[in-house]
Image: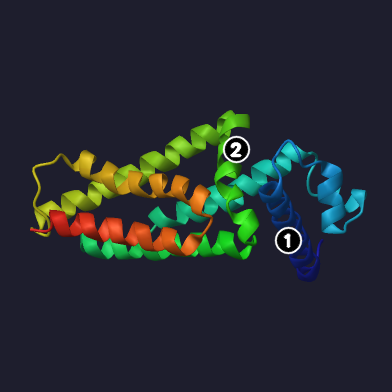
Amino acid sequence: MQSKHSVFLMKDTKEHIVKTAFLLFLQKSYKAVTLKDIIYATGLSNGAFYHYFDNKEQLFKEVVEQYLFRITGQVFKSYPKRSLWDFIQYTLRKMEKIYDTVKNYANKGESVNFIYFMFEALRYFPEVREATIRLQHLELNTWIEMIEVAKANGEIKSELPNEIIARLFTYMPDGNGMAFAVDNDFKPLKQRIRELWEGLYTTLKA
């Protein structure tokens, strides 16, 4: 039976491998990074590394799970349902935490590659595409639900269908994400999304 100390140590080692691999994938690309590169960067022996991951594909999927799905999926698991405004502010705070997490794991030159990292995940692994589609559906349906609430309680007034309004909110960060790939700076990206969402809300407000 493993002691609590050994379990925590194993968890820390696995997280160290995943974080190190994430940084390398940001710096280069999935195809360019070799297992030898990753093992060397972790400072582990081959045997210690293979105790946690069998190959690069398995490790890449774990990186995607932790830094793409687990972080972003948290936004829509529990959220305020009192008003659309509260939901917007809650989502902005959560998004800022996501941006800050990525920024903390990469310097300015590497951060831009997060966009390409996402595209690579979609390109090479069909299951990642399927999971992304499920996450997008969850996001869209959550916005639709909140817009229905806002119309019902008189918070907003619009003849536009709820789904159209929801798509306006959800597409704005996507477009700004591409702009970020050029600007390479998180601060204006966060501010831009806040201004766009709050501006759209003001337009819809009853």
Residue 46, position as x, y percentages in the image: 91, 49
Q: Is residue 206 visible?
A: yes
Instruction: Name the outermost residue toward the bottom.
Output: 5
Residue 179, position as x, y percentages in the image: 45, 48
Q: Amino acid at mark 2?
A: Ala
Q: Is residue 193 above or below residue 63?
A: below
Q: How is the image coloured?
A: rainbow
Query: Separation of disc 2 and disc 1 at Cα?
Result: 24 Å
Q: Is residue 4 left or right of residue 67?
A: right
Residue 2, position as x, y percentages in the image: 81, 62
Q: Secondary structure at mark 2?
A: helix
**In which quadrant is the N terminus drawn?**
bottom right
Q: Please give the residue where the numbered disc 2 appears in the rendered image.
A: 121
Q: Amino acid at mark 1?
A: Lys
Instruction: Name the outermost residue toward the front.
Output: 183
Which residue is at 66% across, 49% downward?
Answer: 26
Q: Is residue 121 left or right of residue 156?
A: right
Q: Which mark is residue 11?
A: 1
Question: In front of the other: label 2 or label 1?
Answer: 2
Q: Is residue 185 above or below residue 144?
A: below
Q: Earlier in the sequence, mark 2 or mark 1?
A: 1
Residue 170, position as x, y percentages in the image: 33, 46
Q: Could you say which is closer to the camera, residue 40 or residue 140? A: 40
